[in-house]
Amino acid sequence: MSTLSFNVQGPKVFLVTQGALPNVMQQPTPTLDFSMAQRMGCDHFQFGFKARNLLNPRNRQTHLFNGVEYDWSSFTRGRTYSVSLSYSI
């Protein structure tokens, strides 16, 4: 069995500020994940593989000032991979 999943959310308020300071907004950050599991041999063993955040996009929090969008914070989370082997009785 294999699964490929994609998710993205629209912009949302990340930090509410006071006074004349603009609010900080979380910009859309798409994610793409893949997972698979395969039974092996006599159905007691199962091999699994997962890959997360395959697109590795920039995670951006921004604020708008005088019509210009500035980065408040910008980083990437990195990709993660995992392999598993399980045995069921």
Image (tube, helix red, strand yellow):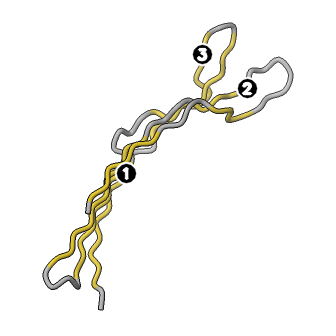
- Left or right, residue 15 beside residue 10: right
Rendered image quadrant of residue 38: bottom left
* Amino acid type for the residue under numbered disc 1: Arg
Per the image, the residue denoted by label 3 is 69
The answer to whether mark 3 and mark 1 are in CB contact below 8 A is no
Secondary structure of the residue carrying numbered label 1: strand
At 20% across and 82% down in the image, what residue appears?
Answer: 43
The circle on residue 4 is none
Secondary structure of the residue carrying numbered label 3: strand
State which tag comes first along the sequence, 1 or 2.
Answer: 2
Question: Would you call the spot at circle 3 few (<14 residues within 10 Å), some (14-19), or many (20 or more)?
Answer: few
* Amino acid type for the residue under numbered disc 2: Asn
Query: Where, quadrant-wise, is the C terminus in this rendering?
Result: bottom left
Per the image, the residue denoted by label 1 is 52
Question: Would you call the spot at circle 1 few (<14 residues within 10 Å), some (14-19), or many (20 or more)?
Answer: some
Residue 57 at x, y percent in the picture: 42, 35
Residue 3 at x, y percent in the picture: 31, 55
At 26% across and 75% down in the image, what residue appears?
Answer: 85
Front residue (pair 77, 38): 38
Rendered image quadrant of residue 20: top right
* Amino acid type for the residue under numbered disc 3: Glu
Per the image, the residue denoted by label 2 is 23
At 69% across and 13% down in the image, what residue appears?
Answer: 65
At 45% across and 42% down in the image, what residue appears?
Answer: 7
Image label count: 3
Rendered image quadrant of residue 44: bottom left
Q: Is residue 70 above or below residue 61?
A: above
Gap between marks 3 and 1, in whole Å? 29 Å
Residue 74 at x, y percent in the picture: 53, 31
Front residue (pair 36, 70): 36
State which tag comes first along the sequence, 3 or 1.
Answer: 1
Residue 2 at x, y percent in the picture: 27, 58
